[in-house]
Image (cartoon, rainbow, N blue to C red):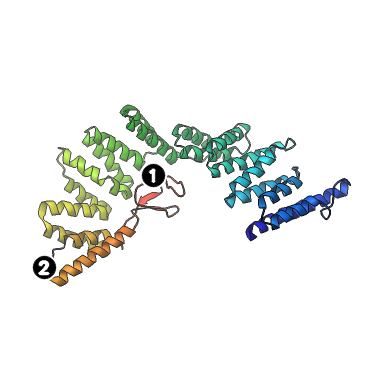
């Protein structure tokens, strides 16, 4: 209540000051000391009836060039506080005034659209922002808000058109964003079994961003599903060159491609080259598993121990402990069990993916951060120590 009191007291003071100012030029107006509405509003406020107090103060603040900014500021404050219903009432009251200037009405429409967005009323917000876009007032802000709405509503065609309009105004390229929109459309087409359309969308995704990791992954998965393992491997290999941080996402698919391909090179040879190039723990662990399958536990343990000396990692240590032979003594058995449990807990508490922009942690891969809504900002988390 105290916080709301501090918020509304300046409005009450402004109401009284404006009433006093106008009383000098208009003798029919009451001074703030005698205006019953002024004291009525204060009484509502002190008796914890803020909605009624708002109605009184907004009524006293007749909308004109002197007071419109006060209305806008009050509505903005309520929206930031999460009191969207109150913000909507104030901005709707502004727009309803026939004497409101054109530029002030446009500002009120923008604020009301943001109120609706905050309340999740995207259809209402969309119509207001479209009106602003057509009027050429606050067009950049309106388009930016429309883009947010279309992303949340997964209307990717509209997102592409809006992004193009926004680029023409700001001069800022949104290539990576647009590439993701085409990838979303490709996934929808793939789900509908329209492989031709899906491939067309992926080509457009590449046209926006030649190094798009997502487009490469989708292309590889599409080719793999059709049995085109050579083409799939080629697509996946662009991840190793351009975006090696996403290798943990695609290594299982690359392994499947090599196991089903007859091109000569083995998956082990591929991993050995990859480890030499990238020095990544995921690649090293994958190679360790192949060595274990082909050469046995002793060779795998030796390889991983040597690698961990240069590249310490919790994941690598966990794999090493899991392979470490138990000599049958009680002490060794208990120590191994304790160490495995400790590493299990550490790795379970660690996020698999993290947003490099806002720090959002996730257990699964997202191409758009659920927290800050940035595209391509979620990355696999290396567990180096």
C-beta proximity under 8 Å, tags 2 and 1: no
Q: Is residue 180 visible?
A: yes
* Label of residue 328 in the image: 2
Q: Which residue corresponds to the image point at 31% horizontal and 29% vertical from the top-left?
A: 193
Q: Quadrant of residue 103?
A: top right
Front residue of 356/48: it is 48
**Number of numbered discs on residues:** 2
Looking at the picture, how far across and down is residue 332, in whole percent?
A: 16, 70
* Residue 93, horizontal then vertical, whole percent: 68, 41
141 relative position to 246: left or right: right
Mark 2–mark 1 Cα distance, whole angstroms, equals 47 Å
Above or below 109: residue 8: below
Badge 1 local density, few (<14 within 10 Å), some, or many (20+)?
some
Tag 2, which secondary structure?
loop
Residue at 24% x, 50% y is 274
The image shows residue 241 at horizontal and vertical percentages of 30, 45
| Occupied quadrant, residue 305 | bottom left
Q: Nearer the viewer, mark 2 or mark 1?
A: 2
Q: Residue furthest front?
A: 47
Q: Is residue 154 left or right of residue 222?
A: right
For the N terminus, the quadrant is bottom right
Left-right relation of 95 to 155 = right
- Residue 279 visible in the picture: no
Decide if residue 216 is on the left or right side of residue 14: left
**Residue positioned 61% across, 35% down in the render:** 132
* Foreground pick, 51 / 229: 51
Identify the residue position indicated by label 1 in the image.
367
What is the x, y in percent for residue 76?
Answer: 63, 48
* Quadrant, the C terminus: bottom left
Residue located at (12% from left, 58% from top): 297
**Which circle's residue, 2 or 1, is located before the other in the chain?**
2
């Amino acid at each position: 209540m105290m916080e709301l009191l501090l918020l509304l007291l300046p409005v009450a003071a402004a109401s009284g000051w404006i009433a006093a100012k106008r009383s000098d030029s208009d003798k029919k107006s009451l001074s703030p000391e005698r205006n019953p509405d002024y004291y009525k509003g204060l009484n509502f406020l002190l008796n914890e009836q803020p909605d009624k107090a708002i109605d009184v103060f907004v009524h006293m603040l007749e909308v004109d060039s002197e007071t419109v900014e006060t209305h806008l500021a009050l509505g903005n404050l309520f929206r930031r506080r999460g009191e969207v219903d109150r913000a909507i009432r104030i901005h709707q009251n502004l727009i309803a005034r026939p004497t409101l200037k054109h530029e002030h009405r446009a500002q009120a429409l923008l604020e009301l659209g943001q109120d609706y967005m905050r309340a999740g009323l995207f259809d209402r917000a969309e119509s207001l922002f479209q009106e602003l876009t057509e009027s050429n007032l606050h067009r950049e802000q309106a388009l930016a808000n429309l883009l947010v709405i279309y992303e949340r509503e997964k209307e990717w065609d509209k997102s592409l058109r809006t992004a193009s309009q926004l680029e023409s105004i700001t001069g800022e390229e949104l290539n990576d964003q647009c590439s993701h929109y085409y990838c979303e459309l490709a996934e929808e087409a793939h789900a509908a079994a329209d492989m031709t359309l899906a491939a067309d969308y992926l080509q457009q995704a590449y046209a926006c961003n030649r190094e798009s990791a997502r487009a490469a992954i989708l292309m590889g998965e599409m080719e793999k599903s059709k049995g085109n393992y050579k083409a799939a491997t080629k697509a996946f290999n662009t991840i190793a060159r351009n975006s090696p941080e996403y290798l943990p996402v695609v290594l299982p698919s690359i392994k499947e491609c090599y196991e089903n391909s007859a091109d000569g090179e083995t998956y082990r040879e591929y991993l050995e080259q990859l480890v030499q190039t990238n020095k990544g723990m995921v690649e090293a662990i994958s190679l360790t598993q192949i060595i274990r399958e082909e050469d046995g536990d002793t060779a795998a343990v030796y390889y991983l121990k040597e690698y961990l000396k240069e590249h310490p990692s919790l994941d690598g240590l966990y794999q090493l402990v899991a392979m470490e032979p138990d000599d049958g003594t009680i002490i060794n058995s208990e120590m191994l069990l304790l160490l495995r449990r400790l590493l299990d807990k550490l790795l379970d508490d660690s996020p698999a993916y993290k947003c490099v922009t806002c720090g959002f942690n996730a257990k699964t891969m997202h191409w758009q951060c659920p927290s800050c809504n940035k595209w391509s900002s979620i990355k696999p988390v290396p567990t180096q120590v």
